[in-house]
Image (cartoon, rainbow, N blue to C red):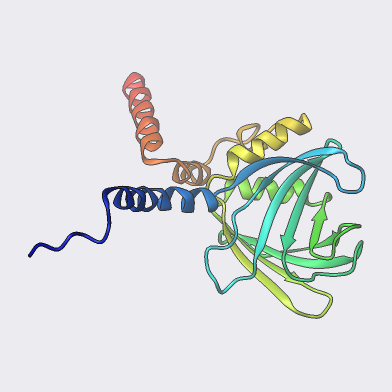
Amino acid sequence: MKHRSFFGKSTSSIMLTLLIALPVNAAAAGAWSYHQDRERLTNRPYSFARSPLPSSAQYENIRLEVACKENRLQFVIDTSSLIASQGRSFDVEYQIDKNPPVTISMKTFADSKRRGYTEEHAREIIDGILAGQSIFIRVNTMIRQVLTAAIALEGADQPIQQVFADCGIGGSDKTEGAAYSWAEFEQDFNKLTSAQQQEVLGKIRKIMLEMR
């Protein structure tokens, strides 16, 4: 006696479709992205690049944002935990790749206890993000709790450049003035896809052959 399969053809097709879609959705959820929104207090439009959440469960739910508000750059920390009362200062320590850690002061927004920003240090941090591969963040809260997160910087360039364009400013100054260093090339090269890396190597080979 033959036993019929519990799953019909339509059910199997649906399950196969879901299994195929899972990696795509996971990748999309873990990527830097570009957004536009309006301020809750003023209703003024602004744009921002947003990081993914940390990939490890050992860290807090912290996202980073690079925002353009009224033609001014802001570096923003967004967390689900309490940082400080509205409009209060708090200390943040960040480290990009293996560079020395840097401690700065940030301030919570007037309408939030869980979001903070800096304009003074924004460009310095953003340039570091564009040149780096990962960033480690330590947020010192008003209740003496330390919130930590490690966030990958792969894919941050394009959303941040869109924010730069909205602010009417140029991109990172690393291609201007000083010579393009080998370390910068390695950092930029590692951010590319395999196909893009092969394209770059092909162009370099062509240049080298022309210089012989």
Q: Observer-nearest residue: 136 or 177?
A: 136
From what the image shows, is residue 201 above or below residue 101?
Answer: above
Q: How many labels were placed on the picture?
A: 0
User: Residue 53: where, in percent of width, then height?
Assistant: 60, 59
Q: Observer-nearest residue: 193 or 1?
A: 1
23 sits to left or right of 80:
left
Residue at x 69%, y 47% (from the top left corner):
126
Q: Give residue 42's quadrant in the image.
A: top right
Residue at x 67%, y 63% (from the top left corner):
62
Q: Give residue 84's quadrant in the image.
A: bottom right
User: Residue 43: where, in percent of width, then height?
Assistant: 88, 41
As drawn, the residue found furthest toward the top would be: 210
- In the picture, the quarter occupied by the C terminus is top left
- In the picture, the quarter occupied by the N terminus is bottom left
As drawn, the residue found furthest toward the bottom would be: 144
User: Residue 20: where, in percent of width, then height?
Assistant: 36, 49
30 sits to left or right of 40:
left
As drawn, the residue found furthest toward the front would be: 1
146 sits to left or right of 97:
right
User: Residue 121: where, in percent of width, then height?
Assistant: 79, 52
From what the image shows, is residue 153 above or below residue 198?
Answer: below
Q: Observer-nearest residue: 75 or 175?
A: 75
Residue at x 71%, y 35% (from the top left corner):
164
As drawn, the residue found furthest toward the left would be: 1
